[in-house]
């Protein structure tokens, strides 16, 4: 295709649209509409790498300026806003992929969720079938700042009370240790030692998890 004045005008127009769209991207319809000339320019820009398309074979594929590709952090911002708006309702990662992430950035959802959990903005619970559900800490009245300074005596009764308070909020029996410490104002290391002892006494069930790598997100469940 000859790159005359019209080509350059259309090139600048398409790149400007995508620059303004940023990491949200644009669908083909919003980018070029029915313009045959712009469609030809789009092909050239895709070939040169100035424009990137995600999931090109799927309906609703998104086009991005090569300088403004979606990141895990930008997807995390969208997930956080969606969970805040969801209130106390829990959302699975599959739901988040459908409602928050477009085809172009669905692969970033898991990375984004890890960022949100690490930042203590979002918490995760797991049901019996090991499906993970996520919710906004703020929506459930959790501070989001991690475990509080110890102010409550750690006993079997106080731990149970904190555990039941969380399960009533979430509806799940699996609870993150970090959440338990935060809810009950327990010292995290003392709580870990207590749960290990309770597990050996067959009073609680600790799900499989790595203490060091999980950021204290091993899940204890009461044995009733």
Image: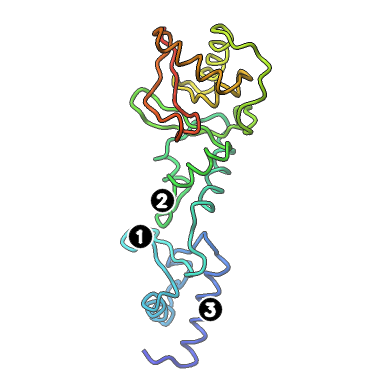
Instruction: Relative to 139, say whether 76 is above or below.
Output: below
Please report whichever mark, 2 or 1, sits nearer to the chain's N-terminal start: 1
Q: Which of marks 3 and 2 is nearer the N terminus?
A: 3
Query: What's the CA distance linking mark 3 and mark 2?
Result: 27 Å
Give the mark toward the camera: 3 or 2: 2
Relative image position of residue 69 (x, y in whole percent): 48, 63
Q: In this view, does 104 lie above or below 31?
A: above
On the image, which quarter does residue 142 sit in?
A: top right
Residue at 37% over, 31% down = 131
Which one is nearer the viewer's eye here, 181 or 102?
181
**Residue visible at 33% across and 26% down?**
129
Determine which residue is flagged by label 3.
13
Would you say the residues marked 2 and 1 are in contact, meaning their CB atoms lie under 8 Å apart?
yes
The label on residue 106 is 2
Q: Do the residues labelled 3 and 1 touch (CB within 8 Å)?
A: no
Query: How was this image coloured?
Result: rainbow
Q: Mark 3 or mark 1, which has the lower sequence index?
A: 3
Residue nearest the observer in this picture, 17 or 29: 17
Against 82, residue 46 (above or below) is below
**How far apart are the two marked residues, 3 and 1, measured between alpha carbons?**
23 Å
The kind of secondary structure element at disc 1 is: loop
Quarter occupied by the N terminus: bottom left
Q: How far apart are marks 2 and 1 (CA)?
A: 10 Å
Q: What is the secondary structure assignment of the residue under circle 3?
A: helix
- Label 3 crowding class (10 Å Cα cut-off): few <14, some 14-19, many 20+? some
Indicate the position of residue 111 as horizontal and vertical percent values.
45, 47
Report the residue marked by disc 1. 55
When asked about the image quadrant of residue 140, the answer is: top right
Q: Where is residue 55 in the image (x, y as percent from the top left)?
A: 35, 60
Q: Residue 37 carries which label?
A: none
């Amino acid at each position: 295709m000859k790159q005359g004045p019209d080509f350059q005008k259309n090139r600048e127009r398409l790149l400007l649209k995508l620059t303004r769209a940023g990491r949200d991207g644009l669908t083909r319809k919003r980018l070029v509409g029915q313009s045959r000339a712009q469609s030809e320019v789009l092909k050239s820009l895709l070939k040169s790498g100035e424009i990137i398309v995600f999931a090109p074979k799927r309906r609703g594929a998104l086009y991005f300026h090569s300088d403004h590709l979606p990141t895990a952090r930008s997807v995390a911002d969208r997930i956080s806003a969606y969970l805040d708006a969801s209130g106390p309702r829990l959302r699975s990662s599959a739901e988040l992929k459908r409602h928050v992430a477009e085809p172009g950035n669905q692969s970033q959802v898991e990375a984004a969720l890890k960022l949100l959990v690490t930042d203590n903005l979002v918490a995760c619970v797991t049901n019996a079938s090991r499906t993970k559900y996520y919710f906004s800490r703020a929506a459930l009245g959790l501070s989001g700042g991690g475990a509080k300074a110890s102010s409550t005596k750690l006993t079997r009764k106080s731990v149970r009370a904190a555990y039941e308070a969380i399960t009533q909020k979430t509806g799940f029996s699996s609870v993150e240790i970090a959440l338990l410490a935060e809810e009950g104002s327990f010292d995290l290391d003392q709580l870990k030692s207590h749960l290990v002892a309770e597990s050996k006494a067959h009073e609680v069930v600790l799900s499989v998890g790595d203490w060091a790598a999980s950021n204290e997100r091993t899940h204890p469940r009461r044995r009733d």
